[in-house]
Amino acid sequence: MPSVPSILVTRRLPDSVESALARDFGATLNSDDHPLTAAELQRGLAAYDIVLCTLTDRLTREVLEAGSGGVRLLANFGAGTNHIDLEAARRLGIVVTNTPGVLTDDTADLTMLLILATARRAREGARELRAGSWAGWRPTHLLGTRVSGATLGVVGFGRIGQAVAHRASAGFGMRVLYHSRRRATPEVEAACAATYVPVLESLLAQCDIVSLHCPATPATHHLIGASQLAAMRPTAFLVNTSRGDVIDELALVSALEEGRIAGAGLDVFEREPAVPEALRTLPNVYALPHLGSATTASRVAMGECALRNIAAYVRGDAPPNRVA
Ligand code: DGY
């Protein structure tokens, strides 16, 4: 690795991060912010030592193999790495890093927004107001579901799941249940006031709101499908700020259309940026375009974290957030 490696940055980043990349490494930036095609990615992998990539870059086995020989480090901007074939990267000797931890609070905050918006029918209310069709206050108008004191099920209990559990219990007096592959320590459970439920379907059956926080892996692909949705209460809401393919979207659409669950709050989708029409138009769906970490603070911190990983790698040290 040369002391000043060549770096390709695949998307626009906050100004301060781009300035540091340009100043310290003369990095090639993506000034028009277009998503790179597979061919552009392959050319970039072949031509640069380091690629600072993100979740819109589909770094499949084919793309990595076709571009191998050049790139040594994929410094991912983001915590999720399901868009990178990590196994292929390992085999090809490409190091992969991510940016965990710095977006936890903002993603947890946005989860609370989705919980509140779905349970309190914010979409229907805002739509009525904008259409000029609000007929005035009345006792039976747009009655929603009380969030305070409700039972929340957190599926996946990493940093973000724990941050949501903490907000829900400490801020909203919610009873929090959680399910994950591994049970958390008693200290973490106590700090989040959360109770472990070993069987997913049992958690689903007990909750007023279910919020998903597991990473996208082969084991979590369509973790929530028709039978899990059937285990939920018809009055319950499903919220997802993790990855779209944790839910079987077709099964979700059927459950929503048939009133088998009460509603959904979604920030992520199976085939982004494509979103099924039903999930864009159903009144009981509050959907956002993958905004979980979209604050200036998080995006700058993510960029700085990627820079730390790059700097460590270039110095010959272990990058702090190596995933492959
Ligand atoms: C991530 O870090 O993977 C998030 O999805 C970006 O918001």
Image (cartoon, grey):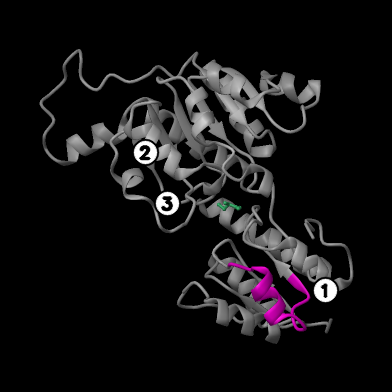
At 52% from the left and 70% from the top, the residue drawn is 12
Mark number displayed over residue 289: 3
Local secondary structure at mark 1: helix
At 59% from the left and 20% from the top, the residue drawn is 169
Mark 3 or mark 1: which comes first in sequence?
3
Callout 2: 10 Å neighbours few (<14), some, many (20+)? many
Look at the image and say whether residue 65 sits in the magenta stretch: yes
Mark number displayed over residue 286: 2
Residue 26 percent coordinates (x, y):
66, 83
Callout 1: 10 Å neighbours few (<14), some, many (20+)? some
- The answer to whether residue 168 is left or right of residue 198 is left
Magenta range = 58-73
Residue 314 percent coordinates (x, y):
82, 73
At 69% from the left and 63% from the top, the residue drawn is 85
Screen quadrant of the N terminus? bottom right
Residue pointed to by mark 1: 314
Residue 149 percent coordinates (x, y):
50, 13
Q: Amino acid at mark 2?
A: Tyr
Mark 1 or mark 2: which comes first in sequence?
2
From what the image shows, is residue 183 above or below residue 79?
above
- The answer to whether residue 72 is left or right of residue 222 is right
Residue 308 percent coordinates (x, y):
75, 63
Q: Amino acid at mark 1?
A: Val
Q: CA distance from mark 1 to mark 2?
A: 43 Å
Local secondary structure at mark 3: loop
Screen quadrant of the C terminus? bottom right
Local secondary structure at mark 2: strand
Q: CA distance from mark 3 to mark 2?
A: 10 Å
